[in-house]
Amino acid sequence: MSIPPPPRTNPVGPPPPPGAPSGHPSIGPTPAPPPGGPGGATSLPGASRPPGPPPQFFVDHKKGEVNELRQLLRQVQLDKDQQKKRDAIKKVIAYMTLGIDVSKLFSEMIMATSTTDLVQKKMIYLYLANYAESNSELAILAVNTLQKDCRDEDPTIRGLALRSLCSLRLTNMVEYLEAAIRRGLNDHNGYVRKTAVVGCLKLYHISPEVVKDSDLLSILYKLTADGDPQVVTNALCALNEMHTEEGGMAFDRNLMIHLLNRIRYFSEWGQSIILNLLTHYPPADDNERFDIMNILEERLKH
């Protein structure tokens, strides 16, 4: 016979009144949050949200920096400290090498050319040559500035200005290049003359007819007897390249004897140029051949 379980009894104490919180968590459904968000604000249907901040993808941050450079260049132009001016120009060149368009600073850079500092001159000429080729209006300002510096008292500045002027490679500026090159070929300084010889070769590549129809070729032949060995070397290279279609420059006995008697004053590069040209010269007889070998005896010992 099985014994029945004892009946269930209520916990000790009276039952809680209706609505009072009990000590156990309720299992009922969770009440929904008030409409409109945590604050309880009710959003009207069709209402638009407030506009957010504008996108920053297409904002030109470099424009303000270029304007700062313009102010800096104008400020240092009034300052006597050459180092500050040099640092300001360095910043412009640094921006240019990074591909940032700083052509708006052209007028300020033109004003900065009024200096005797060679480091500033080199950087300014680099800037002028870079933007003058792509902008015809800026090219006129650049050519005028470089032509002025080609008449400077300092031969180094004259040579640098002439080299930068010939590096523009502008077909519509050929007449200005020819006048500056012709003046440089007759300069009393060797550095300017050798720079003008290279500029004459650049002019030939821009417009061969201008060089062939003028007396520039005869001037270059005269410079093969120049007192500066570097000028002679540049003249030989330029003439030989200009006469490539004819097999090289005209090389007679007088020029050959003159160059061989002075070959010891040339650099190693200049000596190699002369010896290379000598291979195209046919001696008239065995006596002349032995004379050439006697002159080159000292060179052949190396």
Image: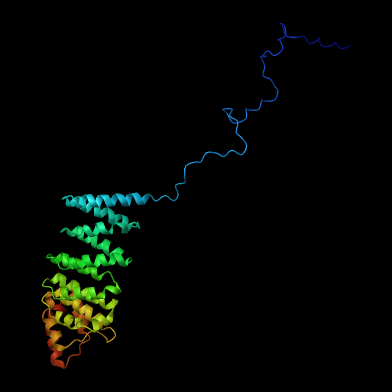
Residue at x 10%, y 81% (from the top left corner): 261
**Is residue 43 left or right of 254 when viewed as pictured?**
right
Residue displayed at 22% across by 67% down? 144
Q: Residue furthest top?
A: 13
Q: Can you tell which quarter of the image residue 271 is in?
A: bottom left
* 262 to 82, vertically: above or below: below
| Residue visible at 16% across and 67% down in the picture | 158
Residue 302 visible to an observer of this rendering: no
Res. 199 image quadrant: bottom left
Indicate whether 96 appears above or below 253: above
Please state the horizontal and vertical placement of residue 193, each as a whole percent of the image.
Answer: 16, 73
Between residue 176 and residue 231, name the one nearer to us: 176
In front: 28, or 158?
158
Q: Nearer the viewer, residue 244 or 145?
A: 145
Quadrant of image for the N terminus: top right
> Which residue does the image show at 14% across and 85% down from the upper left?
255
Q: Is residue 273 left or right of residue 18?
A: left
Horizontal and vertical percent for residue 53? 47, 42
Give the number of marks: 0
Q: Residue furthest right?
A: 1
Q: Nearer the viewer, residue 268 or 247?
A: 247
Residue 99 percent coordinates (x, y): 35, 58
Residue 224, placed above or below residue 118 = below
Q: Could you tell me which quadrant the C terminus lies in?
A: bottom left
Colour treatment of the image:
rainbow
Left or right for 289, reference 69: left
Using residue 279 as the reference point, say whether residue 18 is left or right of it. Answer: right
Q: Is residue 122 visible?
A: yes
Q: Position of residue 162 (x, y in %)?
A: 20, 69
